[in-house]
Image (tube, rainbow, N blue to C red):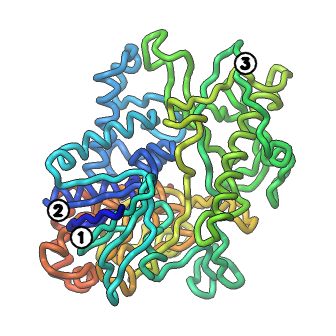
Amino acid sequence: MHREARADIAIIGGGVGGCAAALAACRMGKRVVMTEENEWIGGQLTSQAVPPDEHKWIEQFGCTRSYRTFRNRVREYYRLYFPLSDAGRYAVNLNPGNGGVSRLCAEPRVMLAVLQTMLAPYVNSGLLQIVTRCRPIGAETDGDRIRSVTVKEADGRKLTIHAPFVLDATECGDVLPLAGVEYVTGAESKRDTNEPHALDGPANPCDIQAFTHVFAMDYVEGENHVIDKPRDYDFWRCFQPPGWPNPLLNWVSPDPRTLEPTEEALFPGTDKYPLFIYRRIIDRANFVPGAYLSDITLVNWVQNDYMLGNVYDVPEGEARKHREQARQLSLSLLYWLQTEAPRPDGKQGYPGLRLRPDVTGTEDGLAQAPYIRESRRIKAEFTVLEQHVSTAVRGECGAEAFPDSVGIGCYRIDLHPSMTGRNFLDISSLPFQIPLGSLIPQRVDNLLAACKNIGTTHITNGCYRLHPVEWNIGESAGYTAAYCLDHGCRPRDVRANPGKLEELQQLLTREGIELAWPKVGPV
């Protein structure tokens, strides 16, 4: 069976950027069809089980109004429906997990519930149709325009969506090759971008950051929850990445900023950093006794970074192999933690570590989808380079000011090990703007990039790929598409026309999107 749907805007991909784009477009009265490959919408926040990576000013400024609404509603959800302790109830900015990575570490299911609630008015009114468990398989084009996108649903049916505007909000930029949109992958050459940390030799499209298959676990002292030995455990137990001082499954790994060996631990109690609290999403101290049997954490560590091969622009069999090997790596890390990991008390292993499939909505406790750090990236009207945002390059001048700003973001330039064996790159950056030109393809007129597939480089992807930035990109893409439909113009026309650009930026400002930073320092 082959179904058809018509909309004003087709949003392919229902992750962080896709959801924000849908909210914006529907606020403007546009009919939207949003598709998502996984069972849950929300991407990094939900199906990938990655708590939000955010900057230190996030509670005061530096994100869009709707993203702040989302964060506040996550906290309200816990206050309304969960038995909080006095510590949790009276916390000014409740952080359910008190995780080290974020001021809002919370359960993926709660994040999902809040996103669904925010989108519910538009779903109920008929403005928004959400189709999950489907992936894009084709696109029809007419010159420099996309006429339709076809997705394949889990039951084998096909759905073709006809829309005058298409937003690619997929995790890997999947619409781009289907529609013949020009794009790049991997690392650029220094001779092409002049970036200080670009490759000295030729560009390498395979030099792509590692991805991670996150899993959820808790710890029950005195119980035995050791899983069956993973099929590939012996391989991963001995695997040593290039330039590392020891095997991957180890408490010692390179410090991302200095590349010097650094030692970690699982729990607090030593002078080593306790990884269990890094992405902890439930801290029992925030809840009444008995509400949770244990704290719960999400495991997205360097020890389960998968760096042996990519999952896009390779044959499907190879992509499937790498996805499965990444799962095997995460299961092997858990098994090592349960059985062999050295403990401060001289023992080995923590058999009380327990997978939590209820947290991830899966049968095995692994996330529904891997966390992809680096997508295909459009060849854009404007590409953000390292020298636009690097603290070392720009010093006290601040990041490059973009006259076509459609939002802001802030994060260090944080690159994980790559598929070619290059190690971490983690350097300081300056709070930056999101230029409209980075969302616009060089040729195609009615497509906008709506997540981490914008016009960045391998280097600047490292600071534009995080949750609040992706939300801002998607939201601004949704408003831009709606503006263009209302005014009968193309995004590149808006960018080129000072009057239209000012109108769009006024719209964004009214809707709570910050376009510039106050005076703040680097990160």
- Most extreme residue toward the bottom, as rendered? 143
The circle on residue 224 is 3
Residue nearest the viewer, comparing 254 with 307: 307
Percent of width and height locating residue 177: 48, 77
Q: Residue at x 38, y 29 (%)?
A: 94
Mark sitting on residue 481? 1
**Tag 3: amino acid:** Asn
Specify few, some or many for label 3: CA neighbours under 10 Å numbering under 14, 14-19, or 20 or more.
some
Relative vertical location of residue 321 with respect to residue 340 in this rendering, above or below? below
Disc number placed over residue 226 in the picture, else none? none
Q: Secondary structure at mark 3?
A: loop
* Discs 1, 3 touching: Cβ within 8 Å: no
Q: Which residue is mark 2?
A: 30
Please indicate whether residue 96 sits to the left or right of residue 516 in the image.
Answer: right
Asked whether disc 1 touches disc 2, contact meaning CB atoms under 8 Å apart, the reply is: yes
**Which residue is farthest top?**
289
The amino acid type, in three-letter code, at marker 2 is: Lys
For the residue marked with disc 1, what is the amino acid? Ala
Spatial CA span between label 1 and label 2: 9 Å
The front one of 393 and 145 is 145
* Quadrant housing residue 71: top left
